[in-house]
Image (spheres, rainbow, N blue to C red):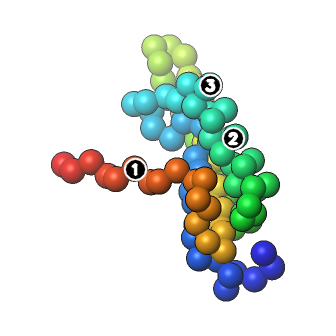
Amino acid sequence: MADLNEVRYVKRIIVGSDNPARIRTQAEIDDALALLNKCLTGTPKGTILGVEKSFTILHVGEHQVVMQWFAYHVGFPRKPVWLPDEEAPKPG
């Protein structure tokens, strides 16, 4: 995909832990990486449009823990049929 005018669907994939109240397991991170790889190699083939990078320093007792995550924005000419549906936001 050479032109952004062809982008009709964007999928945001978070790799890492973005919520200090809920640290993602290694299996969840591996699943996100597998989805990212499938988005970049499957049909239709996606293109990375942008990457968000963030980190948070947490204090756990007397230790400091660095929590970081990346959010990849992958653009497609159409929504792939194999892509899971978005979860609906829960009210209140």
Residue that carries the numbered disc 2 in the rendered image: 33
Residue 72 visible in the displayed image: yes
The tag on residue 87 is 1
Task: Work out whether mark 1 precedes mark 3 in sequence or the reverse, and give the earlier one.
Answer: 3
Q: Work out how far the residue at label 1 is from the one at label 3, CA to CA, in angstroms.
A: 21 Å
The x, y position of residue 42, in whole percent, is 75, 55
Name of the residue lying farthest toward the bottom: 5
The x, y position of residue 76, in whole percent, is 66, 69
Q: Does residue 68 sit above or below 7 in this rendering?
A: above
Residue that carries the numbered disc 3 in the rendered image: 26
In the picture, residue 4 is in which quadrant?
bottom right
Disc 3 marks a residue whose amino acid type is Gln
Asked whether the beta carbons under mark 1 and mark 2 sit within 8 Å of each other, the answer is no
Question: How many badges with numbers are in the image?
Answer: 3
* Image point (40%, 50%), residue name: 87
Q: Work out how far the residue at label 3 is from the one at label 2, CA to CA, in angstroms.
A: 10 Å
Q: Name the mark nearer the viewer: 1 or 2.
A: 1
The x, y position of residue 17, in whole percent, is 54, 36
Q: Does residue 31 sit above or below 38 in this rendering?
A: above
Label 2 neighbour load within 10 Å: few <14, some 14-19, many 20+: some
Q: Does residue 4 sit above or below 83 in this rendering?
A: below
* Image point (62%, 25%), residue name: 26
Give the side of residue 10 with respect to residue 6, left or right.
left
Disc 1 marks a residue whose amino acid type is Glu
Give the side of residue 6 with respect to residue 88, left or right.
right
